[in-house]
Image: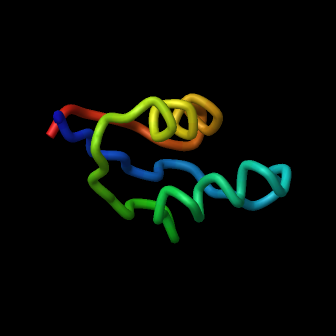
Amino acid sequence: MSKIKVKQVKSAIKRPQDQKRTLEALGLRKIGHVVEHDTTPSILGMINKVKHLVSTEEA
């Protein structure tokens, strides 16, 4: 299974609670933090929900 790197590029301040929880579920804590996940439909759905706050790249 392929991997995807997710990096938080914008703040979660003044964002709806569900977006803050999604970032937390992805394991992102602060701007510039990078995490690596397997490319699964659930992870891709979470990334799509907060795509304006994160950047992605193939690992």
Say left or right for 4 vs 22.
Answer: left
* Residue drawn at x 51%, y 70% as measured from the top left: 29
Is residue 13 or residue 37 the one in the foreground? 37
Task: Locate the C terminus and report the quarter of the image it occupies.
Answer: top left
Above or below residue 17? Residue 39 is above
Label total for image: 0
- Between 39 and 6, which is closer to the camera in this rendering? 39
Q: How is the image coloured?
A: rainbow
Q: Answer with left or right where residue 35 lies relative to residue 21.
A: left
x, y percentage for residue 39?
31, 35
Residue at the spot 47% in from the left edge and 65% down from the top edge: 27
From what the image shows, is residue 33 above or below residue 37? below
Q: Quadrant of the N terminus?
A: top left
Picture residue at 32% right of the left edge, 58% below the top: 35
* Viewer-closest of 40 and 55: 40
Among the 4 quarters of the image, the one containing residue 56: top left
Instruction: State the image coordinates of residue 19 (x, y, percent, origin top left).
Output: 72, 49
Q: Identify which residue is drawn at 70% across, 60% down.
A: 21
Residue 2's quadrant in the figure?
A: top left
Spot occupied by residue 57 in the image (x, y as percentages of width and height): 25, 33
Q: Is residue 34 above or below residue 16?
A: below
Does 2 sit above or below residue 26? above
Quadrant hosting residue 53: top right
Residue 35 horizontal side relative to residue 51, left or right: left
